[in-house]
Image (cartoon, rainbow, N blue to C red):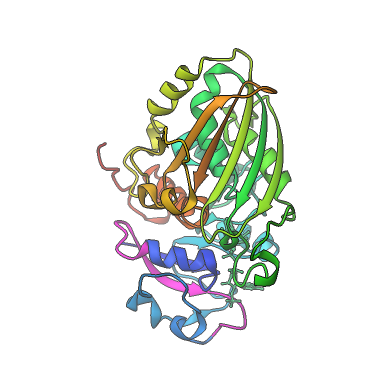
């Protein structure tokens, strides 16, 4: 088993890491770290556990470490606030760790892969550029913003039709703002039509994720996105309402077929956390819904439906992903699996583990 350290382990995403890593095929949680508030306490004492499954006993007794600890784990999963991650994550990659981050701090750096492996697993090769340019013996890879996930997964199969303009309206769950998140008096019986910094992320991240790797850089998707992000009183699961204009508008049936036939990127196939299928098309009139569809594929699948013509652009649809699983912890675990499978841990003495046949 490969030992991993979880940074920000006591938070909303950190707890998902701990839950998803229990019984993981390749990884074992060996170290946990959080803020000064938690340092020196056991994980059980420091963490207000909010998930319905029990806290894993093997983690409950770990002592929470400070961020400047000398971590022994070769793999580091980060769920820190962005401002804390800014200098720490590159320093850990410099010191030889494979860092898989959830935070926004380094997502758009030209030599840092922004990975949704089912769509762009080949972008992991930017690690070689990073190692050349920055002298890392480790690596730094990033997971996208949680709202970007359903947008990018739904659009990837449609790229052959020439995606040119995309309008996104999000309905985002409250777990997306961490713990304790937005005050209950603000969100009960209400919708908040502003989430700081979110619209900019949803407008730029898909261009990098859906771009193409050429030599040492990503050529962004030549498209324009406009996003309006809203917080709604849903616990988990981000829904996006998407309208798209194409270079060559396809018939609706061709879009349905593209979604149903979608295969994950070859380099991602067989990774332990990859769901099968990664995209579920539903023709239910009132689906997808957060309560009914967020756990599809153990929370790692994106569900897409309500496909119909758009009177302004060409077509519109609804897509949904689990924000703390596919949109955060599960996604960062998948990215770490990809690093191992592609041999980026070999220099650290880690095995290049085999992906299972699919
Ligand atoms: N929630 C989501 O759906 C989601 C999705 C995608 C990405 N993200 C990103 O993931 C990161 C974590 O989000 P979250 O929702 O899990 O937040 P959260 O619930 O507020 O948890 C924050 C974690 O970071 C620790 N922390 C806070 N300040 C620290 C400091 N100065 N030094 C060391 N540790 C510190 C906290 O430790 P203590 O418990 O000790 O305070 C806690 O473990 C953020 O960058 C967020 O943008 C979140």
Q: Quadrant of residue 52?
A: bottom left
- Above or below, comparing residue 51 to residue 167 in the picture: below
- Horizontal side of 276 relative to 282 (left or right) equals left
Asked if residue 357 lies left or right of residue 268, the reply is: left
Residue 217, visible in the rendered structure: no
Q: Residue at x 33, y 78 (%)?
A: 57
Quadrant holding the C terminus: top left
Q: Quadrant of the N terminus?
A: bottom left
Q: Whole-percent x and y of residue 48?
A: 50, 79
| Residues drawn in magenta | 21-39
Tell me where residue 96 appears, x and y as whole percent.
Answer: 51, 58
**Residue at position x 54%, y 37% in the image:** 318
- The image shows residue 37 at horizontal and vertical percentages of 61, 83
Residue 84 drawn above or below residue 339:
below
312 or 33, nearer to the observer: 312
Quadrant of the displayed image that contains ligand 1: bottom right
Question: Residue drawn 65% across and 53% down?
Answer: 104
Q: Position of residue 145 (x, y in %)?
A: 60, 49
- Closer to the camera in the image, 292 or 351: 292
> Which residue occupies the extreme left position in the image?
357
**Residue at image coords 60%, 66%:** 178
Q: How many marks?
A: 0
Q: From the viewer's perspective, is residue 258 above or below residue 279?
A: above
Q: Is residue 135 magenta?
A: no
Q: Quadrant of residue 313?
A: top right
Q: Quadrant of residue 341?
A: top left
Quick check: can you spot residue 337? Answer: yes
Relative placement, left or right, of 185 versus 296 is: right
């Amino acid at each position: 088993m490969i030992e991993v350290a979880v940074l920000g382990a006591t938070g909303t995403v950190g707890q998902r890491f701990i839950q998803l890593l229990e019984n993981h095929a390749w990884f074992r949680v060996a170290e946990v770290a959080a803020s000064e508030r938690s340092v020196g306490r056991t994980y059980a004492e420091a963490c207000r556990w909010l998930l319905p499954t029990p806290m894993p006993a093997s983690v409950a007794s770990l002592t929470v470490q400070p961020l400047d600890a000398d971590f022994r784990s070769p793999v580091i999963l980060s769920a820190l606030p962005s401002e804390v991650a800014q200098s720490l994550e590159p320093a850990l990659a410099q010191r030889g760790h494979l860092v898989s981050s959830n935070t926004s701090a380094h997502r758009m750096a030209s030599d840092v892969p922004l990975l949704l492996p089912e769509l762009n697993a080949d972008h992991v090769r930017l690690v070689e550029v990073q190692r050349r340019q920055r002298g890392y013996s480790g690596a730094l890879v990033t997971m996208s913003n949680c709202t970007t996930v359903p947008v990018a997964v739904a659009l990837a199969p449609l790229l052959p039709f020439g995606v040119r303009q995309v309008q996104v309206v999000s309905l985002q769950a409250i777990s997306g703002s961490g713990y304790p998140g937005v005050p209950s008096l603000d969100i009960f019986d209400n919708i908040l039509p502003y989430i700081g910094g979110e619209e900019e992320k949803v407008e730029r991240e898909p261009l990098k994720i859906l771009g193409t790797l050429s030599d040492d850089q990503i050529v962004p998707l030549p498209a324009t996105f406009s996003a309006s992000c809203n917080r709604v009183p849903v616990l988990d699961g981000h829904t996006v309402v998407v309208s798209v204009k194409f270079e060559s508008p396809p018939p609706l049936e061709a879009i349905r077929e593209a979604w149903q036939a979608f295969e994950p990127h070859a380099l991602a196939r067989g990774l332990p956390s990859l769901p099968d299928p990664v995209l579920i098309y539903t023709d239910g009139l009132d689906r997808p819904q957060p309560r009914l569809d967020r756990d599809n594929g153990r929370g790692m699948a994106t569900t897409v439906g309500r496909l119909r013509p758009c009177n302004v652009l060409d077509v519109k649809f609804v897509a949904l992903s689990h924000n703390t699983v596919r949109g955060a912890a599960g996604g960062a675990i998948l990215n770490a699996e990809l690093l191992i499978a592609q041999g980026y841990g070999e220099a650290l003495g880690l095995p290049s583990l085999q992906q299972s046949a699919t």
